[in-house]
Amino acid sequence: MTAESTVPSPGGQPREHGFSPVSVIPPREAADGFRFPAGRRTSVRRTARWPLPAVDAGAALLASLALTGAQRHPLLVGLLLAAVIGLNARASLYRPPAVPAVLDELPAVCGRIVVGWCVLAALVAALSPADALAAGTLAAGCAAQSAASCLGRGAVHWRRRRALVRRPEAALVIGPAGTAQRVAAAFLRHPACGVRPVGIVDRQPSGGEGLPVLTTGEEVQRALIQNGVQTVLVVGRRAEHAPLLRALGESGCVLWEVDAESPSYDVHGERLAGFSCRRLSVGEPRGGAGKRLLDVLVSGALLLAVSPLLLVCAMVLRLADGPGVVFRQERIGKDGRPFTLLKFRTHRPVDAHEAATRWSVANEHEMNPFCRFLRRTSLDELLQLWNVFWGDMSLVGPRPERPYFVAKFSQTYPGYATRHRMRTGITGLAQVHGLRGDTSIEDRCRFDNAYIDNWSLWQDVCILLRTAVALVRPTGS
């Protein structure tokens, strides 16, 4: 965790070109020389998502009503429908794949149908033992629903594949021109993937053969509108194009990260034209309402529980170190917006410039014993619960830093600015892996972006539990 101190930063000197001690995050529509002009953006045709849930619901309804006695349990049939659709949605089975195929999702679909029927059988047996489903009836229900669901899904996917071949989605390929041209050529050789590259986006123009290279925001926007671009393929280091990708994502494009170098493909991702591809999300992950609710409930409860402790710490700190108990400092939060971070003051910088531009490793020999105690137990961070409660921060997320260092690290470490697509937090994945204080900024970037890319509410709970365990055996901040 960070603190005010007087030790120089380990990040090294920033690149002189374009460096500014104030600020920080590139504008939302700027990206390494690319800038979308003001004006209308393209609208992108979206794939309808309702057919797959409708197929699953119809299959569950037909299978349950076809069985003897099911008509006497309409509520349980409704629960079966809700369970199957909920489980499938949780497994992202209603998120249209790049190239849909029913055989790829067959195990997941059938497995959730079996779970749903087992739950239904258990409820029937508990509520009405006389109507308990026999093993044969249970097997027949699973088989009938699986067959109906797979047939229906197969028909939906077949129509989707035909539409992709007949009307492939126009795409832009972002990355180094040479690699991007190679990837674009591979996609053009495999029209069955349903993606037709129409241009390359790179900062440097290319005089070679192949698709046109777009080097300005105006050219990118013109290509989006004239070609109806729906897909963006990213090769190389996507962090270098983060603001541009955000603008494209907000315009409605589907973003894919393409591994153009690996000779094999990742079985956990999707495959397009033989490349391993992974769908990208440039904004804050879905589920933000649940994360915010967790923040408000937990921070509110903790503030009530530790308010006596906060009062005692403030009184002792006032007596031991004089006035100025609360330390306020500008930090950079979500989307590059500044906010005022609150902490108990454990160290007094010489002046405001030193507080803003010196790194966050405390010189413990300069502190009185109580301040050292606050730092080593992380009690000085408790006031940040107010930042969480009011929405400036989250309980879990990348740690916030000062504008000077955000500007510095954003130019030195690829992916650092990308951390700001989510609210900053009191603790995070990097911190529970020991990346606190004077540790590698590059490693922090990697852990923070991995946390955002794979965010889930359960991951937040796990990080909070691991943080609580770490506080039992504090090692300092």
Image (spheres, rainbow, N blue to C red):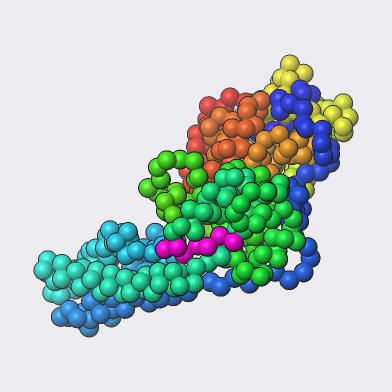
Q: Position of residue 352 (x, y in %)?
A: 87, 33
Residue under the point 40% across and 72% down: 162
- The residue under the point 79% across, 65% down is 38
231 over 206 or under it: above or below: below
Q: Quadrant of the N terminus?
A: top right
* Circle count: 0
Q: Residue at x 28, y 78 (%)?
A: 61
Residue 278 magenta-drawn?
no
In the rendered image of this protein, does residue 425 appear above or below residue 200? above
Quadrant in the rendering for residue 323: top right
* Residue extending farthest bottom: 71
Q: Position of residue 41 (x, y in %)?
A: 70, 69
- Magenta residue span: 191-198
| Residue 15 position in % (x across, y down) | 78, 32
Instruction: Say left or right for 432 vs 388.
Output: left
Residue at horizontal 82 percent and vertical 36 percent from the top: 17
**In the rendered image, the vertical position of residue 67 relative to residue 336, given as above or below:** below
Along the line of sight, the residue nearer the viewer: 399 or 47? 47
The answer to whether residue 299 is left or right of residue 73 is: right
Location of residue 466 in the rendering, given as x and y in whole percent from the top left corner: 50, 37
Between 376 and 199, the residue placed more toward the observer is: 199
- The quadrant the C terminus occupies is top right
Q: Quadrant of residue 376?
A: top right
- Which residue, as the protein is rendered here, is positioned at the far top? 365
Q: Is residue 307 visible?
A: no
> For this view, does 283 lie left or right of residue 104?
right
Q: Is residue 258 visible?
A: yes
Q: Answer whether residue 193 is magenta in the image.
A: yes
In the displayed structure, 309 sits above or below 82; it is: above
